């Protein structure tokens, strides 16, 4: 169960939404651990600030993840300049607080294009290289917002929920064929970022867990859900609980 | 190479199918200087894949992508119809990318007729001695490692040194010897490169397990004289004046015709006869009426053996023995370790498969119930090792491959289990029980278990055009440039896994083709 897997720490990572908040903190933490990070972001200024904090191992790339052609060009540039990425953190997201009656179909789908479309486009591009070697790591920054959507969060909840389904669907297609491309969801918790809440968690703290998560390469992590620093075991029905009881098994939640 | 590039050329040889038969024929032809086009129904896939054959994946697109045969087999066994996903591959490398890489030689009596061991068909048209150099070559090209069979009169000089066996296997070996048997390290086509994952049952990402892809297609392509078109369904062979003049195929909805001097058919014992049956009314090259007939499998006799708690260690696919291969006039077969840990999931799957083929299959709930005995079994089986004995199946014309008028790629067959096979099976089981005496053991399954991964016989070769489809060179009696190099050609199913014989025969046939090609004056470029 290699943590800080050397194939990842010595490789190239793509972090989306790297110009602010958690994406910036993750970029800093990953570069601190030796990873070469290509940071995608929409604002050049934000990316520049991240670069100042992260140092030489950070390559800023102005890419809007909802612009699929730009994503493709971005990955092509990463591959050319740094090599095929072995790690992708789908972090870029938007959370426009908006009542559904204030949405248009277009404004709603623009949110979906970032939160779901960005993860789809970046995963597809990153996998092109990963399936050649059969090795890789994808972490989707996730949330429980889909379980009980709160008011003024429709587009966010729907798109982030769909992104969680996307993780499982990716594994349905790839898990048995490429067991060493490890894919899972990580929920960082409520952060003190622009998207989060004022008295939330320091993103630098969350990024330590996030980096730990991302650099942990183990086949059994595929499909696992982690919240902050611990694993959320999958919900089990009656049958599963009986089976565990019969086998004298107790699911153990892993820690980051 | 693009489809249009392939169409623009006239090929020395087209090979249809890229399993062991097609892969090895393609490799030998290309290495002998011929320009070869390999056509494969399924996808080339990604080299890094580690996919295991999974009958629970049922979507045809998902199955095709993984290199599984996309659709269920349609079997009529003893008059009862069933549909299930058989252990059949459908991508580059064919079924062999999923196989357990056991490359065992047949015995002389598998091919030859003799006074002591009469052969059911009077013998193969090629003798064991004639095949021997090709067994040697195939063992070499597949990097086969293993021990000499102490009972064999013929040594296998090219075998590589077997890998050390575990403590538990070594204890079993001693016990079997004490029981008067002659176990030896199984012949395995694994190179065991660094990071070897023992890819038995799933695709090897490393070119370590030697199969139709790693020992056939890839070396063929590396010569620079072979090209591969995947996802290409050959629908029809066009023949005129005793020659195949065109290979009609479909790719991405486009119907095309390839041309070549020689056509090598290696679509497997289900696929090759199907293509001939689909090529013309009554079947192409079918004057004998034998196209698709004489379908044979093996019977699997699986037995779980508990080595006891005193010796720990994982299950290795390490040992085999041939003491029960031919007993007092009965053709039985060899016994070998399966090299699997009997886990919960495998037992559930296994029980469900048994259920699928039994009259109880209509009671859907039972499928869930098997999970409970499986749970108990998981506890009991814990450290059991599973051995499998193969019982030779004999050729009967009524057992045959059929066309499905609605789907040209469907695997459909009818098969009847003969009483004589059941009699031999009973005898085999008695002998196996005796062979493992001193161990706690249990047969896995009660009904005869046909190994649908070992089909053969459906385009048998022989000297008489009245009773065989192919001649001694595996060339169609009726078509001067059509050869077959898969297990379809087998007149009998032998008492061992078919892979080595498929490979050896493909090399032999490819040599014949290349010899003739060299004799042509214009073929020297």
Image: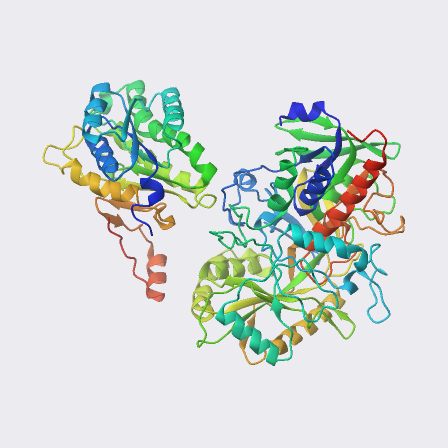
In the rendering, at what x and y percent does residue B129 appear?
80, 59
Q: Does residue B157 lie above or below A2 as drawn?
A: below
In the rendering, at what x and y percent does residue B27 appear?
68, 41
Q: Does residue B474 lie above or below B128 as drawn?
A: above
Residue at the image position 74 percent from the left and 47 percent from the top: B507
Q: Is residue A125 left or right of residue B98?
A: left
Q: How many marks?
A: 0
Kindly tell me whether residue B183 is visible in this rendering: yes
In the rendering, at what x and y percent does residue B224 appear?
65, 33
Quarter that holds the N terminus of chain B = top right
* Picture quadrant where residue B327 is located: bottom right
Kindly tell me whether residue B401 is visible in this rendering: no
Quarter that holds the C terminus of chain B = top right
* Picture quadrant where residue B392 is located: bottom right
Residue at the image position 59 percent from the left and 53 percent from the top: B99
Q: Nearer the viewer, residue A183 or A32?
A: A32
Q: Is residue B472 left or right of residue B361?
A: right
């Amino acid at each position: 169960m290699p943590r800080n897997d050397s194939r990842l720490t010595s490789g190239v990572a793509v972090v989306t939404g790297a110009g602010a908040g958690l994406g910036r903190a993750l970029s800093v933490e990953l570069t601190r651990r030796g990873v070469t990070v290509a940071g995608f972001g929409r604002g050049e200024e934000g990316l520049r600030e991240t670069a100042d904090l992260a140092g030489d191992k950070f390559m800023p790339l102005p890419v809007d993840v909802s612009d699929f052609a730009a994503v493709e060009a971005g990955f092509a540039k990463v591959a050319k300049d740094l090599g095929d990425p072995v790690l992708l953190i789908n972090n870029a997201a938007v959370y426009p607080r908006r009542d559904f009656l204030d949405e248009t179909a277009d404004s709603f789908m623009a949110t979906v294009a970032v939160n779901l479309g960005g993860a789809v486009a970046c995963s597809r591009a990153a996998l092109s290289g990963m399936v050649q070697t059969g090795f890789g790591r994808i972490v989707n920054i996730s949330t429980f917002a889909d379980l009980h959507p709160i008011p003024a969060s429709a587009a966010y909840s729907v798109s982030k929920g769909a992104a969680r389904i996307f993780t499982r669907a990716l594994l349905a297609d790839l898990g048995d064929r490429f067991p060493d491309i490890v894919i899972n969801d990580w929920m960082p918790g409520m952060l003190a970022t622009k998207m989060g809440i004022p008295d939330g968690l320091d993103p630098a703290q969350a990024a330590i867990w996030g980096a730990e998560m991302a650099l942990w390469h183990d086949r059994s992590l595929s499909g696992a859900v982690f919240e902050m620093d611990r694993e959320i075991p999958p919900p089990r029905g009656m049958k599963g609980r009986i089976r565990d009881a019969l086998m004298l098994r107790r699911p153990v939640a892993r820690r980051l | 190479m693009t489809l249009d590039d392939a169409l623009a050329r006239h090929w020395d040889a087209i090979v249809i199918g890229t399993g062991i038969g097609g892969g090895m024929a393609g490799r030998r032809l290309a290495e002998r200087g011929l320009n070869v086009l390999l056509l494969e129904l399924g996808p080339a896939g990604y080299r890094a894949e580690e996919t295991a054959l999974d009958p629970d994946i049922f979507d045809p697109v998902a199955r095709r992508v993984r290199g599984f045969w996309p659709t269920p087999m349609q079997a009529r066994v003893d008059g009862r119809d069933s549909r299930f996903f058989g252990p059949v591959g459908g991508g580059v490398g064919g079924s062999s990318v999923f196989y357990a890489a056991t490359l065992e030689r047949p015995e002389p009596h598998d091919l030859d007729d003799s006074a002591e061991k009469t052969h059911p068909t009077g013998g193969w048209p090629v003798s064991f001695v004639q095949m021997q150099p090709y067994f040697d070559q195939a063992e070499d090209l597949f990097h086969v490692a293993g021990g000499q069979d102490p009972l064999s009169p013929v040594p296998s000089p090219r075998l590589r040194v077997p890998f050390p066996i575990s403590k538990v296997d070594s204890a079993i070996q001693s016990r079997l010897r004490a029981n008067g048997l002659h176990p030896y390290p199984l012949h395995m086509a694994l190179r065991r490169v660094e990071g070897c994952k023992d890819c038995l049952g799933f695709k090897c990402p490393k070119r370590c397990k030697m199969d139709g892809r790693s020992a056939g297609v890839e070396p063929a392509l590396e010569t620079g004289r072979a090209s591969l078109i995947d996802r290409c369904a050959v629908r029809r062979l066009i023949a005129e004046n005793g020659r195949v003049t065109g290979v009609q195929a479909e790719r991405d909805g486009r119907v095309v015709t390839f041309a070549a001097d020689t056509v090598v058919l290696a679509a497997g014992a289900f696929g090759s006869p199907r293509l001939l049956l689909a090529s013309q009314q009554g079947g192409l090259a079918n004057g004998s009426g034998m196209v698709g007939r004489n379908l044979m499998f093996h019977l699997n006799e699986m037995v779980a053996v508990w080595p006891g708690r005193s010796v720990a260690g994982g299950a290795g696919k390490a040992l085999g023995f041939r003491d029960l291969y031919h007993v007092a006039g009965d053709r039985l077969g060899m016994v070998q370790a399966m090299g699997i840990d009997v886990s919960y999931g495998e037992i559930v799957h296994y029980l469900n498969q048994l259920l699928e083929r039994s009259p109880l299959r209509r009671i859907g709930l039972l499928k869930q119930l098997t999970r409970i005995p499986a749970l108990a079994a998981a506890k009991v089986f814990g450290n059991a090792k599973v051995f499998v004995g193969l019982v030779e199946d004999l050729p009967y014309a009524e057992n045959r491959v059929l066309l499905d008028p609605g789907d040209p790629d469907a695997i459909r067959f009818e098969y009847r289990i003969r009483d004589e096979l059941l009699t031999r099976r009973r005898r085999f089981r008695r002998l196996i029980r005796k062979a493992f005496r001193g161990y706690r053991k249990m047969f896995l399954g009660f009904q005869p278990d046909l190994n649908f991964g070992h089909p053969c016989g459906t385009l048998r070769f022989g000297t008489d055009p009245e009773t065989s489809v192919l001649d001694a060179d595996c060339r169609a009696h009726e078509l001067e440039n059509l050869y077959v190099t898969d297990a379809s050609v087998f007149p009998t199913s032998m008492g061992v896994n078919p892979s080595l014989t498929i490979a050896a025969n493909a090399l032999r046939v490819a040599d014949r083709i290349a010899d003739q090609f060299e004799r042509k004056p214009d073929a020297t470029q």
